[in-house]
Image (spheres, helix red, strand yellow):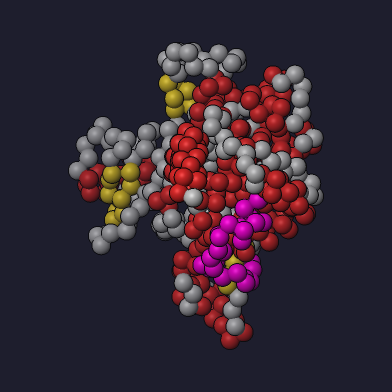
Amino acid sequence: MKRTLTLIICLLSLQIVNATPHFSSVSVSILQNSRLNNDFQKNHADTIIVPVVNQPAPLTSQSGIYKRRLDSIKKDIPLDYNEYVQSYIDIYMRNRDEMGHVLGLTKYYFPIYEKAFHDAGIPDEIKYLSIVESKLDPYAVSRVGATGLWQFMFTTAKLYGLNMDDYVDDRRDPIQASYAAAAYLKDAYQEFGDWLLAIASYNCGKSNVERAIEKAGGATDFWSIRQYLPNETRGYVPAFIAVAYVMNYYNKHNIIPQACNFALKTDTVLVNKYLPLSTVSQSLKLDLGQLTILNPSYKRQIINGTANKPRRMIIPQIDKAQYAALYEALNNTNLPATAPQSMVYTAYHENKEEKTPSYHKVRRGETLRDIADNFGVEVQDLKAWNHLHSNKAEVGKRLKVKDSADEPAEKPAKTSSHNYITYKVKSGDTLKGIASKFEASVEKIRELNGLKKGSLQPGMTIKIGKG
């Protein structure tokens, strides 16, 4: 009996030794996915999709379950399953707390998306794309200036009817931006005839998809042209499919939805004058942060409505007893009916904005396509901004890489206990121009700052008298 037991132990030991290389490879795979996961967390707010080109997750005996589950939620968009999709499923499932937070936010944002998509006649499941883009953060700003829940670049946003000015950035507005995203995706689908290609174009632009189709010999499905797309886009569509899986089967992976931290039931009020959100907050005894997250498009926390063009304000549902206070806030005759001249408000979560370069010096070996890919813009935009008539990038030439109006707004004013505000001088500013902007006098600015002729330099901070 002892000999038999000894033999069994020896056989088991041999099996363990033989299994060791397999165990080691699994450990390496986990380590690689862990690094990928860290990269994802670091970059996701910038809509950078780390491609799992070299080491996609190996398919296992569980693969059939994932495939069946994806097949069960598939509607109009093919939710294909493969090792690339599995890699992104693994990444999202490791971020349980973050995905739980996102699930809570879907209770507010998804009904908005669903209505916009229904009205536009596009598939409901495209709503998951916003999670890939911004994790449902209306204040998300990418390294190249893409902004909002749907991460619109300035030029594309303008093309699809969104407005950006001193008071408003419609890219942050959940309703406006959702209708614009629906319009873009519908246009892309009508061009390519495939929803996954339309989604890919949302990330890299239609021209990149067109070139990839040409290189693939005219193939018109994502997986056939994937290798010819920019690196980020190769992972973008698998990430979308992975999010669709996680949003439907989170309960199978110990992901617990967290409560949304702002009001889910809201009322809409049309405002026909300039109304600070702080006034509404005080009148209705509402938290200003909650009111701001419901109205993220107002950069200065001022509703800039007019009689001809009233603006929408979203508020948490209130009791009938509060209607009088709301009426008083809306009809307060002490509030300006037109734009205040020198009122300065700091945008909520403004610190999320990153300083992005406006110009790029062409290096040896770079093409316009390389530069456009690096800065997340279209070649035709580069050509238009720089008055170029060919695709040639001249070495050493300084190229404009974003629309000037897309540059982050200056922060002209910090309130101070003194009777002045401060302003950071930009390139091209003159004392006369600054004085005109703030209705101040050139002499007063010179006196406050001890400026001599020719001493105004970009980047310096100067004081501007209030009166």
**Which residue is at 24% across, 34% downward?**
455
**Which residue is at 31% across, 38% downward?**
459
Instruction: Please say whether residue 270 is one of the residues in the magenta stretch.
Output: yes
Answer with left or right where residue 240 lies relative to residue 385.
Answer: right
Whether residue 166 appears in this view of the structure is: no
**Which residue is at 55% across, 46% downward?**
90
Answer with left or right where residue 157 lies relative to residue 31.
Answer: right
Q: What percent of the width, then of the height, locates residue 99?
A: 54, 56
Q: Nearer the viewer, residue 23 or 334?
A: 23
Question: What residue range appears in magenta?
Answer: 244-273
Q: Nearer the viewer, residue 221 or 401?
A: 221
Answer with left or right where residue 365 lies relative to residue 440.
Answer: right
Write down the quadrant of residue 307 in the picture. bottom right
**Which residue is outermost to the bottom?**
321
Write down the quadrant of residue 39 in the picture. top left
Q: Quadrant of the C terminus?
A: bottom left
- 334 relative to 48, above or below: below
Q: What percent of the width, then of the height, locates residue 374?
A: 50, 28
Q: Nearer the viewer, residue 339 or 244?
A: 244
